[in-house]
Amino acid sequence: MPTFVQILDFIGTFAFAISGIRLASAKRFDWFGAYVVGLATAIGGGTIRDVLLDVTPGWMTNPIYLICTGLALIWVICFGRWLIRLNNTFFIFDTIGLALFTVVGVGKSIALGYPFWVAIIMGSITGAAGGVIRDVFINEIPLIFRKEIYAMACVVGGIAYWLCDAAGMESYVCQLVGGSAVFVTRILAVKYHICLPILKGSEETDGNS
Protein backbone atom coordinates (compact mmCIF):
# COMPACT_ATOMS: atom_id res chain seq x y z
CA MET A 1 0.00 0.00 0.00
CA PRO A 2 1.48 3.39 -0.97
CA THR A 3 2.58 5.73 1.80
CA PHE A 4 1.19 9.23 2.29
CA VAL A 5 4.32 10.73 0.72
CA GLN A 6 3.99 8.45 -2.30
CA ILE A 7 0.35 9.48 -2.71
CA LEU A 8 1.43 13.14 -2.66
CA ASP A 9 4.09 12.30 -5.23
CA PHE A 10 1.56 10.59 -7.51
CA ILE A 11 -0.94 13.45 -7.25
CA GLY A 12 1.85 15.94 -7.93
CA THR A 13 2.92 13.90 -10.95
CA PHE A 14 -0.62 13.93 -12.34
CA ALA A 15 -1.05 17.66 -11.70
CA PHE A 16 2.29 18.64 -13.22
CA ALA A 17 1.72 16.35 -16.20
CA ILE A 18 -1.61 18.06 -16.88
CA SER A 19 0.05 21.49 -16.70
CA GLY A 20 2.67 20.40 -19.23
CA ILE A 21 0.21 18.69 -21.56
CA ARG A 22 -2.15 21.66 -21.36
CA LEU A 23 0.58 24.03 -22.56
CA ALA A 24 1.70 21.53 -25.21
CA SER A 25 -1.85 21.39 -26.57
CA ALA A 26 -1.90 25.19 -26.77
CA LYS A 27 1.24 24.91 -28.93
CA ARG A 28 -0.55 22.29 -31.08
CA PHE A 29 1.76 19.39 -30.22
CA ASP A 30 0.64 15.91 -31.28
CA TRP A 31 -0.30 13.32 -28.65
CA PHE A 32 3.20 11.88 -28.39
CA GLY A 33 4.80 15.30 -28.13
CA ALA A 34 2.29 16.33 -25.47
CA TYR A 35 3.02 13.14 -23.51
CA VAL A 36 6.76 13.84 -23.64
CA VAL A 37 6.25 17.40 -22.39
CA GLY A 38 3.93 16.17 -19.63
CA LEU A 39 6.36 13.46 -18.58
CA ALA A 40 9.33 15.83 -18.55
CA THR A 41 7.33 18.27 -16.43
CA ALA A 42 6.30 15.53 -14.02
CA ILE A 43 9.61 13.72 -13.52
CA GLY A 44 12.20 16.36 -14.44
CA GLY A 45 12.63 17.95 -11.02
CA GLY A 46 12.54 14.67 -9.11
CA THR A 47 15.08 13.11 -11.45
CA ILE A 48 17.57 15.95 -10.97
CA ARG A 49 17.02 15.77 -7.20
CA ASP A 50 17.56 12.02 -7.04
CA VAL A 51 20.72 12.21 -9.15
CA LEU A 52 22.13 14.87 -6.82
CA LEU A 53 21.16 12.80 -3.77
CA ASP A 54 22.68 9.66 -5.34
CA VAL A 55 19.33 7.86 -5.38
CA THR A 56 17.75 5.94 -8.26
CA PRO A 57 14.94 8.10 -9.72
CA GLY A 58 11.51 6.75 -8.85
CA TRP A 59 10.30 6.43 -12.43
CA MET A 60 13.14 3.98 -13.16
CA THR A 61 11.84 1.52 -10.56
CA ASN A 62 8.09 2.18 -10.65
CA PRO A 63 6.05 2.69 -13.86
CA ILE A 64 3.32 4.55 -11.97
CA TYR A 65 4.84 7.88 -13.04
CA LEU A 66 4.55 6.92 -16.70
CA ILE A 67 1.00 5.71 -16.06
CA CYS A 68 0.04 8.94 -14.27
CA THR A 69 1.29 10.93 -17.25
CA GLY A 70 -0.69 8.71 -19.61
CA LEU A 71 -3.83 9.25 -17.53
CA ALA A 72 -3.17 12.99 -17.58
CA LEU A 73 -2.95 12.88 -21.38
CA ILE A 74 -6.24 10.97 -21.60
CA TRP A 75 -7.81 13.49 -19.21
CA VAL A 76 -6.74 16.43 -21.39
CA ILE A 77 -7.88 14.65 -24.57
CA CYS A 78 -11.31 13.90 -23.09
CA PHE A 79 -11.86 17.17 -21.24
CA GLY A 80 -9.64 19.49 -23.27
CA ARG A 81 -12.40 21.91 -24.25
CA TRP A 82 -13.55 22.18 -20.66
CA LEU A 83 -9.98 22.79 -19.48
CA ILE A 84 -9.46 25.48 -22.12
CA ARG A 85 -12.57 27.32 -20.92
CA LEU A 86 -11.10 27.46 -17.44
CA ASN A 87 -8.71 30.38 -17.71
CA ASN A 88 -6.73 29.36 -14.63
CA THR A 89 -6.36 25.67 -15.49
CA PHE A 90 -2.62 25.79 -16.07
CA PHE A 91 -2.03 27.94 -13.00
CA ILE A 92 -4.10 25.71 -10.71
CA PHE A 93 -2.49 22.42 -11.72
CA ASP A 94 0.99 23.94 -11.86
CA THR A 95 0.62 25.38 -8.36
CA ILE A 96 -0.69 22.07 -6.97
CA GLY A 97 2.25 20.23 -8.51
CA LEU A 98 4.68 22.86 -7.25
CA ALA A 99 3.42 22.57 -3.67
CA LEU A 100 3.29 18.77 -3.55
CA PHE A 101 6.66 18.22 -5.21
CA THR A 102 8.35 20.74 -2.93
CA VAL A 103 7.32 18.93 0.24
CA VAL A 104 8.22 15.56 -1.29
CA GLY A 105 11.70 16.86 -2.13
CA VAL A 106 12.27 18.42 1.27
CA GLY A 107 10.98 15.35 3.11
CA LYS A 108 13.09 12.93 1.10
CA SER A 109 16.25 14.97 1.67
CA ILE A 110 15.65 15.20 5.41
CA ALA A 111 14.91 11.46 5.58
CA LEU A 112 18.27 10.78 3.92
CA GLY A 113 20.03 12.81 6.61
CA TYR A 114 20.91 15.94 4.66
CA PRO A 115 21.04 19.34 6.45
CA PHE A 116 18.11 21.70 6.19
CA TRP A 117 19.65 24.02 3.59
CA VAL A 118 20.23 21.09 1.25
CA ALA A 119 16.65 19.92 1.87
CA ILE A 120 15.26 23.35 0.98
CA ILE A 121 17.33 23.49 -2.22
CA MET A 122 16.29 19.95 -3.16
CA GLY A 123 12.65 20.82 -2.51
CA SER A 124 12.96 23.86 -4.77
CA ILE A 125 14.62 21.79 -7.51
CA THR A 126 11.93 19.12 -7.23
CA GLY A 127 9.18 21.70 -7.51
CA ALA A 128 10.59 24.10 -10.10
CA ALA A 129 12.99 22.20 -12.38
CA GLY A 130 10.29 20.24 -14.19
CA GLY A 131 8.60 23.50 -15.12
CA VAL A 132 11.87 24.84 -16.50
CA ILE A 133 12.24 21.78 -18.74
CA ARG A 134 8.59 22.12 -19.83
CA ASP A 135 9.01 25.76 -20.79
CA VAL A 136 12.20 25.04 -22.72
CA PHE A 137 10.41 22.27 -24.63
CA ILE A 138 7.58 24.60 -25.65
CA ASN A 139 9.98 27.47 -26.44
CA GLU A 140 8.90 29.80 -23.64
CA ILE A 141 10.95 31.75 -21.12
CA PRO A 142 10.80 29.59 -17.96
CA LEU A 143 8.57 30.97 -15.20
CA ILE A 144 11.46 30.70 -12.78
CA PHE A 145 13.34 33.37 -14.76
CA ARG A 146 10.46 35.84 -14.94
CA LYS A 147 9.29 38.36 -12.37
CA GLU A 148 6.70 35.96 -10.95
CA ILE A 149 7.40 34.41 -7.57
CA TYR A 150 7.82 30.75 -8.46
CA ALA A 151 10.93 29.10 -7.05
CA MET A 152 10.79 31.51 -4.11
CA ALA A 153 7.45 29.96 -3.20
CA CYS A 154 9.27 26.63 -2.98
CA VAL A 155 11.87 28.19 -0.68
CA VAL A 156 9.13 29.58 1.58
CA GLY A 157 7.46 26.17 1.72
CA GLY A 158 10.77 24.44 2.35
CA ILE A 159 11.56 26.73 5.27
CA ALA A 160 8.07 26.19 6.70
CA TYR A 161 8.52 22.41 6.41
CA TRP A 162 11.93 22.55 8.11
CA LEU A 163 10.66 24.74 10.98
CA CYS A 164 7.85 22.27 11.66
CA ASP A 165 10.27 19.34 11.49
CA ALA A 166 12.71 21.11 13.82
CA ALA A 167 9.83 21.68 16.24
CA GLY A 168 9.27 17.91 16.36
CA MET A 169 5.94 17.89 14.55
CA GLU A 170 4.64 14.81 12.74
CA SER A 171 5.71 14.40 9.12
CA TYR A 172 2.18 14.82 7.77
CA VAL A 173 1.89 18.14 9.63
CA CYS A 174 5.20 19.29 8.12
CA GLN A 175 3.95 18.29 4.67
CA LEU A 176 0.62 20.05 5.14
CA VAL A 177 2.19 23.26 6.42
CA GLY A 178 4.97 23.26 3.83
CA GLY A 179 2.66 22.54 0.91
CA SER A 180 0.15 25.13 2.08
CA ALA A 181 2.93 27.71 2.37
CA VAL A 182 3.95 27.11 -1.25
CA PHE A 183 0.35 27.20 -2.47
CA VAL A 184 -0.64 30.33 -0.54
CA THR A 185 2.57 32.18 -1.42
CA ARG A 186 2.06 31.50 -5.13
CA ILE A 187 -1.65 32.41 -5.02
CA LEU A 188 -1.06 35.68 -3.15
CA ALA A 189 1.88 36.62 -5.37
CA VAL A 190 -0.22 36.28 -8.52
CA LYS A 191 -3.39 37.79 -7.05
CA TYR A 192 -1.66 40.90 -5.71
CA HIS A 193 1.02 41.09 -8.42
CA ILE A 194 3.85 40.60 -5.95
CA CYS A 195 7.14 40.00 -7.70
CA LEU A 196 10.86 40.19 -7.13
CA PRO A 197 12.77 43.30 -8.28
CA ILE A 198 14.20 43.13 -11.79
CA LEU A 199 17.98 43.34 -12.07
CA LYS A 200 18.56 46.31 -14.35
CA GLY A 201 21.24 46.23 -17.02
CA SER A 202 23.97 48.83 -17.35
CA GLU A 203 22.17 50.53 -20.26
CA GLU A 204 18.99 50.98 -18.19
CA THR A 205 21.02 52.29 -15.25
CA ASP A 206 22.84 54.82 -17.45
CA GLY A 207 19.59 55.92 -19.02
CA ASN A 208 18.01 56.67 -15.64
CA SER A 209 21.00 58.64 -14.35
Image: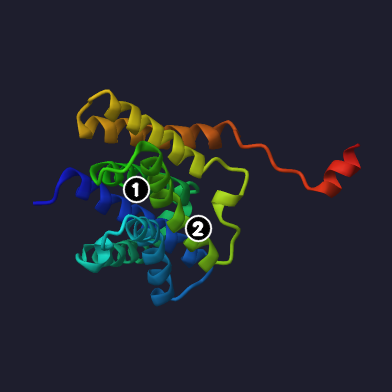
Residue 3 badge: none
Dot 2, crowdedness within 10 Å: few (<14), some or many (≥20)?
many
Give the image quarter of residue 92. top left
**How is the structure coloured here?**
rainbow
Label 1 – label 2 distance at C-alpha:
14 Å
Q: Nearer the viewer, residue 111 or 6?
A: 111
Determine whether 57 is above or below 29 in the image.
above
* Left or right side of 33 for 138: right
Residue placed under numbered mark 1 in the picture = 101
Whether residue 98 is visible here, answered yes or no, is no
Rendering coords of residue 61 (x, y %): 20, 66
Q: Disc 1 marks which amino acid? A: Phe
Give the image quarter of residue 102. top left
Whether residue 143 is visible here, answered yes or no, is yes
Rendering coords of residue 145 (x, y %): 59, 51
Residue placed under numbered mark 2 in the picture = 132
Q: Nearer the viewer, residue 110 or 131?
A: 110
Q: Disc 2 marks which amino acid? A: Val
Which residue is most to the left?
A: 1
Which residue is most to the top?
A: 167
SS at badge 1 = helix
Residue under the point 56% across and 56% down: 142
